[in-house]
Structure formats: structure tokens, C-alpha cells
Amino acid sequence: MPIARLSEQDDFPAAERAGREGLLAVGGDLSPRRLLRAYGRGIFPWYEEGQPILWWSPAPRFVLFPREFHCGATLKKVLRRGDFTFTFDRDFVAVIRACALPRTGQPDTWITPEMRDAYTELHRLGYAHSLEAWSGGELAGGLYGVSLGRCFFAESMFHFADNASKAVLAVLAGTLAKMAFNVIDCQLPAPHLGAWGARSIPRRRYLELVRAGLRRRTLRGSWEKIPLRKW
């Protein structure tokens, strides 16, 4: 299928029209309306500085079912030892800025200033959320993503301290399982996520999960008071 070219007014084509690598459309904007429309249809933006906005819907899709998270003995020990304390939505801006920092072997970041501003606005509107791990009062790790219905669309994670990102994902999965979320979207395969239970599923199955999840009310607003899963 040809790649769609979007103006600010155009809607997305169906996710099933994406090519083998998952690229569906080019252009448009990162307005809250368009981003929420994209996630609700199984589509997400991913591009680098200097590129136009690229919209993706890969097949298969890499997901983590919250109840399938594999919390091994070592990670359980870290969590029970109390190396970290965890909060929702305490410092979204710090989390997304940390996620945007260059990684080893990756001098560039896809989280451009435009992307940071767009997701910070989604956070202000109550759709994007961060989960932070703290150690000694300092930010040790975290992740952020978008929540619609009972689906959580994870975007990025980071760590400044050993085990912090693992611990954050464990707490997220455990908490979302208690909240009856049906899927955590991880977008593309990653070996470290696979070790914790994430797996590839057909795009058609993923889109069914999203549609089912969107039948439930979105928990919009701050998540600061949501009880966290204790391992």
C-alpha cells in the first residue's frame, strides 16, 4: 500500500494498510486530538529530528499483558528490599527529559523538543502519565506513556541507577493488572522486555485488544493517588 501523506486536516488510513515495516503515514501534526486518535487506532509517531512526522503500526505488535509480567527472584528481592520508592505523575517533565537523553551507542534521540512538548500537553490534559522510581530523594528511573480506556501505550523508559527501570516496569505491570488493564503496548520487539514477559502478537489481535480496551472509561487526570502494586 502507498504511504499516506497527511495534512493537518486529514484523518489516518486504517492501520492494516501499513507496509511490512509498519510505516503508515507521513505528515500531520502532534496535536492532542491527532495523538489520541492515533493511539486509539493502533498507530504511534516515531521519527528523528529533521524528518517529517512518521506514523507507524507494525505487524506483528510487541505487547506485555500486565498479568504475564515475569518478576524473577532477583527483581523481587530488589523490590522487597525497598531500594526505591515509586510515584505516579510526580514529575512527568523530568521523566520525559531523562528519556530523551542520549543513550550509549545512540547519540541521537527520537524524543525531539516537539515530541516532549506534545506529550507534556497530553499529561496536562490527563492522558499521559509517568511512573517514577526514587532513591535517596533523587530520580533513579522512570517511564511514561499514554492511557486510553484500559490500554496503556508505553513510550519510553530510563534509569540512572541499576535495576530502576526493571523495578518501574514491574510496578507498572502489577498496578495495571490490579486496575484490569488488558494490554501494555511496547510497540517493537526488545530482548530485555521479552525477558520480562512481553511478546509479539498479530496486528489484528492487537487492534481487537485496543478496541476492547477503549470500551472502558479512560482514567483521565492525575494518577498520583492510585495505589501501587507491592511485590
Image (cartoon, rainbow, N blue to C red):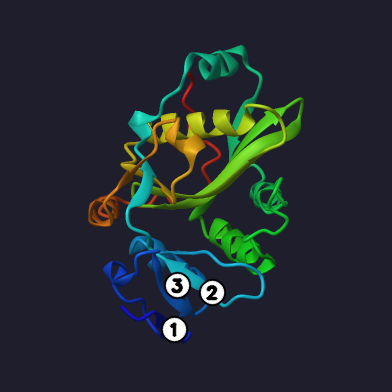
Packing grade of label 2 (10 A; few <14, some 14-19, many >=20) is some
Which residue is found at the position 34% from the left and 37% from the top? 65
Vertical arrangement, residue 199 with respect to residue 49, above or below: above
Residue where numbered disc 1 is placed: 6
Vertical arrangement, residue 131 with respect to residue 128, above or below: above
Sooner in the amino-acid sequence: mark 1 or mark 3: 1
User: What is the C-alpha distance between the residues marked 1 and 3?
Assistant: 11 Å
Which disc is residue 34 wearing? 3
The quarter of the picture where residue 197 lies is top left
Residue where numbered disc 2 is placed: 53
Viewer-side residue, 98 vs 49: 49
Viewer-side residue, 100 vs 130: 100
Q: Does the image show residue 89?
A: no
Which residue is found at the position 69% from the left and 66% from the top? 113
Residue 7 point in image, percent of width and height: 46, 87
- Give the mark toward the camera: 3 or 2: 2
Instruction: Determine whether the residue tagged by mark 2 lies in a helix, strand or loop.
Output: loop
User: What is the C-alpha distance between the residues marked 2 and 1?
Assistant: 10 Å
Which residue is found at the position 40% from the left and 84% from the top? 10
Residue 158 point in image, percent of width and height: 64, 41
Viewer-side residue, 139 vs 199: 199
Tell me the amino acid under the disc marked 2.
Answer: Ile
Packing grade of label 1 (10 A; few <14, some 14-19, many >=20) is some
Tell me the amino acid under the disc marked 3.
Answer: Arg
